[in-house]
């Protein structure tokens, strides 16, 4: 079994904009065609409200505790991202592929009420045993 990769603190200027909370500037520079590599990046605890993540590759990204209110996450594959404790209140999530450890109820609560998402399997819960 391979060890999980440590989230990367990158030197990429676009990544640094996110670390500094400059989401509008990040979105504007991406709209102008500037690229960035966020694969495996450390985005934990960041306030990413309003992020336009269209066509970003966030595979393996560490988003634990990130605040993604109103972010455009449509069509992203977040299945390999760590979203433990992240909030997606009012985000656009059509077509987003979430980690299987996050139940639909958690996603809905976070989307509608801003709750922090919890990974159910980490606590040994089985969705088939609900109400049993």
Image: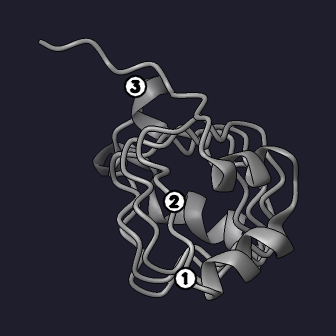
Category of crowding for the residue at label 3, using alpha-carbon neighbours closer than 10 angstroms: few (below 14), some (14–19), many (at least 20): few
The answer to whether 65 appears left or right of 132 in the picture is right
Q: Quadrant of residue 57?
A: bottom left
Dots 1, 2 in contact, CB < 8 A = no
Residue annotated with mark 1 = 33
Residue 1, labelled with which disc?
none
Residue annotated with mark 3 = 124
Q: Residue at x 36, y 21 (%)?
A: 5
State the CA–CA distance, disc 2 to disc 3: 37 Å
State the CA–CA distance, disc 1 to disc 2: 10 Å
Residue at far left of view:
1
Residue annotated with mark 2 = 36
* Of labels 2 and 3, the one closer to you: 2
**Which numbered disc flags the more N-terminal residue, 2 or 3?**
2
**Which numbered disc flags the more N-terminal residue, 1 or 3?**
1
Q: Nearer the viewer, residue 118 or 28?
A: 28
Q: Position of residue 98 (x, y in %)?
A: 41, 61
Q: Nearer the viewer, residue 43 or 82?
A: 43
Q: Is residue 7 above or below residue 55?
A: above
Q: Is residue 125 above or below residue 50?
A: above
Q: Nearer the viewer, residue 8 or 44?
A: 8
State the CA–CA distance, disc 1 to disc 3: 44 Å
Dots 1, 3 in contact, CB < 8 A = no
Q: Residue at x 73, y 56 (%)?
A: 87
Q: Residue at x 44, y 46 (%)?
A: 81
Tag 2's secondary structure? loop
């Amino acid at each position: 079994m391979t060890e999980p990769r440590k989230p990367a603190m990158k030197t990429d200027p676009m990544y640094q904009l996110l670390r500094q909370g400059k989401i509008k500037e990040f979105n504007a520079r991406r709209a102008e065609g500037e690229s960035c590599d966020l694969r495996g990046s450390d985005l934990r605890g960041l306030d990413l409200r309003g992020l336009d993540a269209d066509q970003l590759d966030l595979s393996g990204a560490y988003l634990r505790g990130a605040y993604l209110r109103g972010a455009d996450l449509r069509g992203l594959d977040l299945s390999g991202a760590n979203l433990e404790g992240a909030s997606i209140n009012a985000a656009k999530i059509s077509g987003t592929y979430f980690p299987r450890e996050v139940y639909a109820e958690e996603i809905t609560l976070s989307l509608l009420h801003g709750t922090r998402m919890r990974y159910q399997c980490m606590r040994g819960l089985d969705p088939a045993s609900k109400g049993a």
